[in-house]
Image: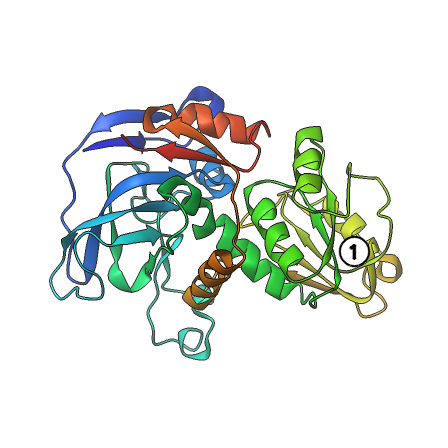
Amino acid sequence: MRAMLLRAQAPISAAPLGAVEIPTPEPGAGEVRVRVRACATCRTDLHVIEGDLPPRRIPLIPGHQAVGRIDALGAGARRFGLGDRVGIAWLRHTCGACRFCTSGRENLCEASAYTGWTHDGGYAQYALVPEAFAYAIPPGFDDAEATPLLCAGMIGYRALRRSEVTRGGRLALYGFGSSAHVTLQVARHWGCSVYVSTRDPAHRRLALELGAAWAGRPGETLPTRVDAGIVFAPAGELVPAALRDLDKGGTLALAGIYMTDLPAMAYAPHLFWERTLRSVTANTRADGEALLAEAAAIPIRPRIQRYGLGDANRALGALAADRVEGTAVLVVD
């Protein structure tokens, strides 16, 4: 099969992904093999490729937002049938028995494994996934349109819940990439007023087009204090300003798997008045199923830019340079 392989972590400007022909993998017990039709890029892919996250498997096929059709079943796999359309997301395995797994917090499982980090991912013609961690893709989305829902959508949905914004509340988003552009659509469906802070003019225009009440540059004062906020950009220096934007009792969620160091903060202006600061660590399968159901009901319309599989370095370079409106998606074949 054809795949884009990472042999050593390096800046995306060095084009570290190479096109290779490797044997098509065979599914193990409880796994399904997916003939990949499309795989979205993600800033987490950049963190894996460039070394912000420590290497867990090298060489590696990145990618954790893949959609395709099942073409082979491993022993005992019977949840899906051949030809079913499914999605592969970031969380690939949990133990199912630890205190986190048994209390609805499987995203914190210490035995967890991840697509495109600990195991090969979707920048390839075929990918494997345990059937218990595959998602049925709702009709109404084509293959490429569905891909951003599998991480950008799911992690944004968990961040939205972690922010504790109420329906009809005031929400601020810091950074406006793939995840934020999906999250805004969910928040607007909930009747929230959404305020977006992002450095790129094209991203501000997209936020307003999708229904944001306001979009401004980092450092600009929001028109109002907000009940909740989500920091999507992996920039720790945004956190103090975002905390200042909260109303009394507000909550700020940090949505990234990686973030630069937070600067020193003062108690009174940043955390007093019962403001809450929370991180987000992956999503549970329950989060994923809830997001996909809500995405179909709204319906969410992800904005995507299509690239060929062999253009993975170029697509990720555009992502790194903030030149992507919505999500860059690799289309296989």
For residue 310, which quarter of the picture? top left
Q: Secondary structure at mark 1?
A: helix
Residue 95 visible, this orientation? yes
Where residue 317 sits in the image (x, y, percent)?
Answer: 50, 26
Report the colour scheme.
rainbow
104, 82: nearer the viewer = 82
Tell me the residue at 78%/55% (across/down). 243
**Quarter containing the C terminus:** top left
**Quarter containing the N terminus:** top left
Residue receiving disc 1: 243
Q: Residue furthest left?
A: 75
Where residue 118 sits in the image (x, y, percent)?
Answer: 34, 49
Mark 1 crowd level (few <14, some 14–19, many ≥20, 10 Å Cα): many
- Amino acid type assigned to the residue bearing label 1 in the image: Leu
For residue 109, which quarter of the picture? bottom left
Tell me the residue at 69%/31% (across/down). 200
Q: Residue furthest top?
A: 14
Where residue 181 sits in the image (x, y, percent)?
Answer: 60, 45
Residue 62 visible, this orientation? no
* Image position of 162 with respect to 117: above or below: below
Where residue 194 sits in the image (x, y, percent)?
Answer: 73, 52
* Image position of 223 with respect to 170: above or below: above
* Image position of 256 with respect to 329: above or below: below
Tell me the residue at 57%/33% (across/down). 325
